[in-house]
């Protein structure tokens, strides 16, 4: 059993005696512009890509962008023509992001060039998107007044749309209303519909079916054993559909949900709530992880107790490099909120933080949050970190020493 306790403003997450808890830390976008993270996806170069569901926070005309961040917390922004919602990364490093309100798909090539492609259906409102097993990206469309579709975009930008038929319910017909989409363990992709789920083969064959009772399927994830996990926006329950077609419900505590799901590198399933600051771990038992963390969302700021809330994206939660679980998040602190990610270190290794500008006390807090330790250092009063070894983003064994040079670099 694992437990997480935030005891006081400067207290760290304290593991139970039975086992060590993963370290949790926050990485904010330092310019403050990327403040509406919606979904997140891992790239093959050990970076993460974030869709931003809103304009950049800046003066002047509205501008939009997606973000790329590494383990050191360094961001790079790539401008798009509209706000983005879903994001997917192909094995060759090509990134696709959906623009629901402009009905375009933005493509960012590995060399950083951005091109945007309009969907064949006007006002298609592309939403969730996933890398498919065929080397293409697949996305959901729910155009108002039109038949829902699943779209496929090739690395070259060619888009094909496949209709998803409505389903009968009682004496009426319910539009498909497709939502989250994920790649399965075969040649099919799975997606949510208004009353159930569906799948599409890489050749475009669509199949849908209803779940046992009316619900609002919201999130999807594939477990290591091929089981499909389906969360619901209106029910405190997750349905697990086995490859054999059996449905096994996982009941959550009242007033809980599991909007975004991801399979962890430790064999457990993780899901974040749409509200609050709780990450759930479903392994041998169901365990809550408190996402109130002690960290700073900008350099040279006093440490604060931060509340991390998942933003309801698709998937919103994703596995990243070095056994880390990333949550596209809003980070609440005194004075408002700031966009960023919460990183849960499932592997337990030391992920070296960026100590630039830290005092001794802040440096110790940072390295503890990242499962490292601060090497003994002599420093003048009020001196701050100028250099460090190893550099930020390095992955070492748990508890490894990080050396900080205060004042100025030697």
Image: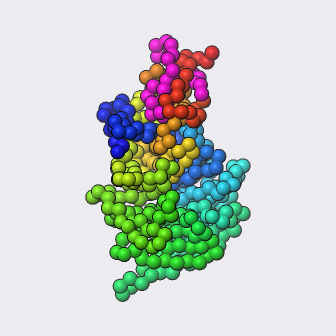
Q: Quadrant of residue 387?
A: top right
| x and y, in percent, of residue 374 in the image | 49, 23
| x and y, in percent, of residue 55 in the image | 52, 52
Location of residue 331 with respect to 129 vertically, above or below: above
- At 62% from the left and 55% from the top, the residue drawn is 89
> Along the line of sight, which residue is nearer the eye, 276 or 99?
276
| x and y, in percent, of residue 79 in the image | 62, 51
- At 44% from the left and 63% from the top, the residue drawn is 229
Q: Is residue 317 left or right of residue 388?
A: left
- At 54% from the left and 25% from the top, the residue drawn is 402
Location of residue 71 with respect to 229 vertically, above or below: above
Q: Quadrant of residue 10?
A: top left
Is residue 212 shown in magenta? no
Location of residue 294 with respect to 244 vertically, above or below: above
Location of residue 168 with respect to 364 vertically, above or below: below
Q: Which residues are magenta?
A: 362-390
Q: Quadrant of the N terminus?
A: top left
| x and y, in percent, of residue 399 in the image | 49, 29
Q: Is residue 251 left or right of residue 131?
A: left
Q: Is residue 334 visible?
A: no
């Amino acid at each position: 059993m694992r437990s997480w306790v935030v005891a006081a403003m400067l207290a760290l997450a304290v593991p139970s005696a039975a086992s060590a808890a993963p370290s949790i830390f926050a990485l904010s976008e330092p310019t403050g512009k990327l403040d509406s993270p919606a979904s997140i996806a891992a790239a093959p170069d050990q970076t993460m890509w974030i869709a931003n569901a809103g304009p950049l926070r800046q003066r002047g005309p509205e501008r939009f962008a997606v973000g790329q961040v590494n383990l050191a917390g360094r961001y790079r922004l790539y401008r798009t023509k509209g706000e983005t919602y879903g994001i997917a990364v192909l094995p060759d490093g090509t990134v696709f992001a959906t623009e629901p309100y402009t009905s375009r798909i933005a493509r960012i090539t590995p060399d950083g060039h951005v091109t945007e492609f309009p969907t064949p259906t006007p006002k298609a409102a592309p939403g969730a998107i996933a890398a498919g097993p065929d080397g293409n990206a697949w996305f959901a469309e729910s155009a108002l007044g039109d038949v829902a579709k699943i779209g496929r975009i090739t690395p070259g930008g060619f888009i094909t749309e496949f209709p998803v038929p409505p389903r009968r319910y009682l004496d009426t017909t319910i539009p498909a209303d497709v939502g989250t989409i994920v790649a399965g363990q075969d040649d099919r992709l799975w997606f949510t519909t208004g009353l159930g789920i569906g799948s599409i083969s890489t050749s475009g064959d669509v199949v849908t079916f209803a779940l046992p009772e009316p619900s609002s399927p919201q999130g999807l994830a594939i477990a290591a054993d091929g089981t499909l996990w389906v969360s619901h926006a209106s029910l405190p329950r997750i349905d697990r559909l086995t490859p054999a077609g059996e449905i096994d419900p996982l009941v959550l505590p009242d007033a809980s949900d599991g909007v975004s799901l991801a399979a962890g590198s430790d064999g457990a399933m993780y899901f974040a709530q749409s509200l609050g600051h709780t990450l759930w771990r479903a392994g041998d038992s169901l365990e809550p992880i408190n996402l109130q963390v002690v960290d700073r969302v900008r350099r040279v700021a006093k440490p604060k107790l931060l509340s991390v809330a998942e933003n309801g994206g698709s998937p919103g939660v994703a596995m990243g490099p070095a056994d880390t679980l990333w949550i596209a998040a809003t980070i609440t602190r005194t004075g408002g909120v700031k966009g960023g990610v919460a990183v849960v270190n499932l592997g337990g290794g030391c992920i070296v933080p960026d100590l630039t500008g830290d005092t001794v006390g802040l440096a110790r807090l940072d390295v503890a949050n990242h499962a490292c330790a601060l090497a003994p250092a002599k420093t003048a009063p009020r001196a701050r970190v100028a250099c460090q070894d190893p550099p930020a983003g390095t992955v070492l064994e748990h508890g490894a020493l990080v050396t900080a040079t205060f004042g100025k670099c030697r």
